Image (cartoon, helix red, strand yellow):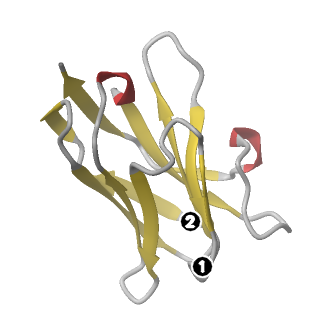
Amino acid sequence: QVQLAESGGGLVQAGGSLRLSCATSGRTYAAGWFRQAPGKEREFVAAITRGGGFSNYADSVKGRFTISRDNAKNTVYLQMNSLKPEDTAVYYCAAYTGGSTYSTQRYEYDYWGQGTQVTVSS
């Protein structure tokens, strides 16, 4: 029984920044951010281990996005800087309950939030 709720999406101009939040409930698990643009498959963005000691990023966002978490607040964050129009998508937070420390694969995540829209204008 894990629940996740994303917030912080919105409209931003290219080059701008947004900070997404994922409020979680239940046990603490490794977490990931995924995104899905219209007509495209949901793709991996970033992942973080349960304690926040390790993170992993898709090449398309490396150096621009930062995933972090504050377990005392039961919240996972995605700081997005230098946003590009191609970053436009619905962003989802997900929890990984598997045996590894984290996962980059969509099908290995068991719990998902409802998504928050991020739109980057040119």
Tag 2: amino acid? Val
Who comes first in sequence, dot 2 or dot 1?
2
Secondary structure found at label 1: loop
Residue at 28 percent across and 37 percent down: it is 83
Position in image of residue 100 (x %, y %) = 83, 67
Quadrant placement of the C terminus: top left
**Tag 1 residue:** 27
Residue at the spot of label 2? 2
Q: Dot 2, how many residues are within 10 Å of its Cα: few (below 14), some (14-19), or many (20+)?
A: some
The percent coordinates of residue 81 (x first, y second) are: 29, 49
Check contact, mark 2 vs mark 1: CB within 8 A: yes
Amino acid type, residue under disc 1 in the picture: Arg
Seen from the viewer's position, the closer of residues 110 and 54 is 54
Element type where label 2 sits in the image: loop
Residue that protrudes farthest toward the top in the picture = 39
Q: Is residue 26 left or right of residue 4?
A: right
When the figure is inspected, residue 51 is found, relative to residue 32, above or below; the finding is below
Identity of the residue drawn at 59% across and 78% down: 28
Q: Quadrant of the N terminus?
A: bottom right
Please indicate whether residue 31 sits to the left or right of residue 23 in the image. Answer: right
Q: Quadrant of residue 37?
A: top left
